[in-house]
Image: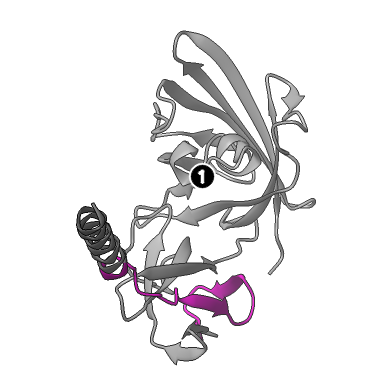
Amino acid sequence: MMKKIFIQLMVFSGLLLTSCSSDTDNVSRVTNYPLIEVNGESTIFVPMGGTYTDPGVVATEGGTVIPTVATFNGNFRGAKTLDVNVPDEYTETYTATNKDGFKATSTRRVIVYKTGDLVNSIEGVYLSTTRRNGTLLPASQGSSVDQKYIYIWKNTNGTFGVSDAFGGWYSIGRKIGVTSATQGGTITGNIPTNTFTYPGNPLSNQYFGGVANITNLNVNAATKTLVLSTAWLAPPATNYSFVSTLTQVQL
């Protein structure tokens, strides 16, 4: 009887040792994820034709500095590199990778701009206060007052392009992002007499769909403001009217 109990204890002990060995083999290694600290301002303005000096970042892995790679994307005009001769809002993305292949990213906004006199040119960076069907964006959804920023640039054919015909209502106010901006709007005509046409019409919103048309633009050089109006037939057959007061930022 004692022999039988001894054999059973030996078998049980062997199972315990096997289990412990298996658990030890599956323990994961510790990895230090990259941390990135962005130097300088989160938004940098560069005049068209000027020079961009990158303040850079400091990336670390467990307290040790590691390399970073910086890339650019033009948010409204499609460039994949920073071009200081092409006004646009560029997103600069810094990427750091640790020794185990885990990545971290941080971003900076680089705005290349040209400021028009609103007599010969409406180019510029603008704060936008937008009303949809006569009403500001409810505070519970965001804010459509002094949204940063709407951009107007001059195309090679002499027309002017606008970054968002909805004045940033969704992209900035509701913080949905660039894909909810109604892009592709173009403006041409006589600025002093406020006589314009809109050859980019009709426009489409990538995020929501539907059909939009810029219907009016009024420029006031004395107050450095533009009033941009756009009509949108949103799916499923809902009519919206956006009126955006754009105040030119004096850079």
Q: Is residue 51 magenta?
A: yes
The prevailing secondary structure element of the residues shown in magenta is: loop
Q: Which residues are magenta?
A: 24-53
The residue furthest bottom is: 64
Q: Is residue 54 magenta?
A: no
The residue singled out by tag 1 in the image is: 177
Of residues 232 and 169, the one drawn nearer to the viewer in this rendering: 169
Residue at x 40% of width, y 24% of height? 209
Horizontal side of residue 50 vs 224, given as left or right: left
The residue furthest front is: 1
- Res 103 visible: yes
- In this view, 166 is above or below 9: above
x, y (%) of residue 185? 45, 39
The quadrant holding residue 130 is: top right
The quadrant holding residue 3 is: bottom left
Query: How many dots with numbers?
Result: 1
The quadrant holding residue 92 is: bottom left
x, y (%) of residue 47? 55, 74
How many other residues sit within 10 Å of disc 1, few (<14), some (14-19) or many (≥20)?
few
- In this view, 182 is above or below 213: below
Three-letter code, disc 1:
Gly
Q: The C terminus is located in which quarter?
A: bottom right
Residue at x 41% of width, y 20% of height? 210
The residue furthest top is: 237
x, y (%) of residue 116? 60, 61
- In this view, 244 is above or below 104: above
